[in-house]
Image (cartoon, rainbow, N blue to C red):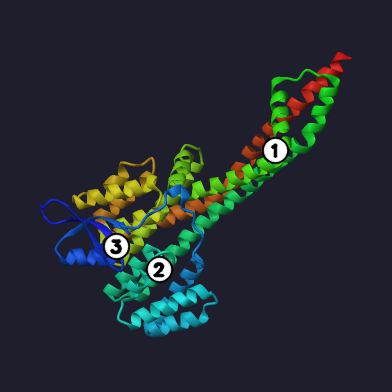
Amino acid sequence: MKFRVTIRKGSAPDEIRTVEAPSRFAVYDQIQKEGGTVTELEDNAERFVLPAWLNISIGTGVKRAEIIRLARNLSAMLNAGLPLSRALSVIERQSSNKRLKTIVTKISDSIKKGSSFHEALSAYPKIFPELFIAMVRAGEESGSLTDALNVVAVQMERSETLVRKIKGAMIYPSIVITAIIIVGVLMLIFVVPTLTSTFTELHVPLPLATRIIVAVSNFMVANVALVFLGLIAIIIGSITFVRSRTGSNVVLSGALYLPVINELIRETYAARASRTLSSLLSSGVPVLEALSITKDVVHTDVFANVISEAEERVKKGELLSTAFAEHTKLYPILMSDMLSVGEETGKVSEMLKQIAEFYEEDVAEKTKDLSTIIEPVLMLFIGTIVGIFAVAMIAPIYSLSSAF
């Protein structure tokens, strides 16, 4: 793989060059051995990359839960005294996923040929997250691979649980809104035309709202295939846009202005950033590298930019908590305060873990209450839509009956 690297050596101007290496960690090692510091690193410098809005993921064939189970099982077997190659062989035989079996076999072969475990893992960046690879590397270097695998399993499991709870809270409103759209389309295609023909025969004057609904209905009846194709295109386009980096940033920026939801988002990202940083620092990963990896794990630019700023401040010798203290609209003020205490006591990793646990529990409680809050809002929304439709279609009938 080729990487575009910006290198800083002492007071000399920054140097930009392309480095060929098996992984980004190998690039860091190479530059450090040369006496330089990596200030910026871009993957696959010469590869053409599609725009974010065209970048559609088709999956990896390996579920996140399987990676978590792999980490836990490896940790248990290494702790029991099995060599890494034997433990990987057991994992390969136990796995029912053919894709994962193939990958584990290739990793085992790479290790037998002299590669380290983290170098073998880095050949599969879509399967093993950067956090996983970094933790394994730190565990190998410190001689505590068992603990590192256990920590990364806990980190990934907590993160997955948090995401699952938030998605679970969104299922109910998603189903209700989808049902409303489907019922609305069916009524416009099959019900409204019947009423329209009645109004036309009786020469009933139609209010503006009724005329708009009738016009929409007439267009949909005349272009049924086009309407359904349009709906499918809108659904696919919306999903693709939301899953892209640009789309997720737009949606997230808008959601931060919503009451209740904004607090949930802020605490979710605070928990994710805190646990990732805690896991990396406790495993011996250097602060700057830990921040760089955490920035990628957080992923969303709105929150990742704060971590980038923290990274720059730490390079200048400032405290880690400083950047978070200046962005309390994104990261809760409690996070910067507890970080500051951790820096004063020399227990940053432990304090970050406490922050993560606090916000994970708080988000779990708030997602339970979210359906209670959303339900009346949905009822108001449905009532408004039904009310507008009913008034628009009943008003002409009422005006007709009052004329007699």
On the question of residue 355 being in view, the answer is: no
In the image, is 233 to the left or to the right of 314? right
In this view, the residue in front, 41 or 167, is 41
Dot 3 surroundings within 10 Å: few (below 14), some, or many (20 or more)? some
In the image, is 138 to the left or to the right of 167? left
- Give above or below for 289 relative to 231: below
Q: Earlier in the sequence, mark 2 or mark 1?
A: 2
Instruction: Count the marks.
Output: 3
- State the image coordinates of residue 14 (x, y, percent, origin top left): 16, 52
In the image, is 151 to the left or to the right of 207? left
- Between marks 2 and 1 in the image, the one whose residue lies nearer the viewer: 1
Instruction: Give the residue drawn at x 46%, y 43%.
Output: 252
- Residue 223's mark? 1
The residue under label 3 is 2
Secondary element at tag 3 = strand
Dot 2 surroundings within 10 Å: few (below 14), some, or many (20 or more)? some
Secondary element at tag 1 = loop
